[in-house]
Amino acid sequence: MFYQIDNVLVNKDVVHSNFACDLAVCKFKKPLSCHLFPIRVSSFGGEILRYERFGDCTPAITKGNSEKTRMVTFLEEPLVRKYGKKWYNALEGIID
């Protein structure tokens, strides 16, 4: 199942998965594809956001589930960086 916000399709796993991890504070901006991980941006007649399951992320998923942190919330900064605050707010509206 996908949700459409403007011209971007978002896989339901991106919206509903819980995700968290600990990061050191750093001024360096990662490339956007790295900053969004584990969300991957694909193209299929437009952009599609999908969650890529990766075994090394299991501890972060476990922590996110225990703290009730959604992946979308955790990845707010890179999502706003790529799509803008208005788009992100529309995505959050799907969750609520």
Image: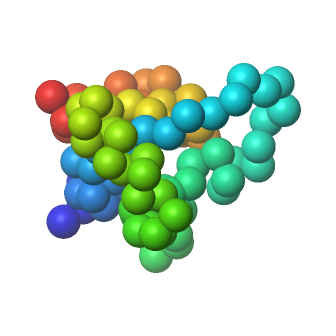
Residue 86 x/y as whole percent = 43, 25
For the N terminus, the quadrant is bottom left
Residue 26 located left or right of residue 34: right
Q: Residue furthest bottom?
A: 44
Q: Is residue 70 above or below residue 36?
A: above
Tell how many labels. Answer: 0
Residue 47 x/y as whole percent = 49, 62
Seen from the viewer's position, the closer of residues 11 and 69 is: 69
Residue 8 seen in the current view: no
For the C terminus, the quadrant is top left
Q: Residue furthest left?
A: 96
Q: Quadrant of residue 6?
A: top left
Residue 64 x/y as whole percent = 34, 39
Residue 50 located left or right of residue 16: right
Residue 42 x/y as whole percent = 52, 70
Seen from the viewer's position, the closer of residues 25 and 76 is: 25
Residue drawn at point x = 25 percent, y = 36 percent: 66
Seen from the viewer's position, the closer of residues 82 and 74 is: 74
Residue drawn at point x = 35 percent, y = 40 percent: 63
Residue 25 seen in the current view: yes
Q: Quadrant of residue 35?
A: top right
**How was the colour assigned to the protein in this rendering?**
rainbow
Residue drawn at point x = 38 percent, y = 31 percent: 73
Q: Is residue 40 above or below residue 76?
A: below
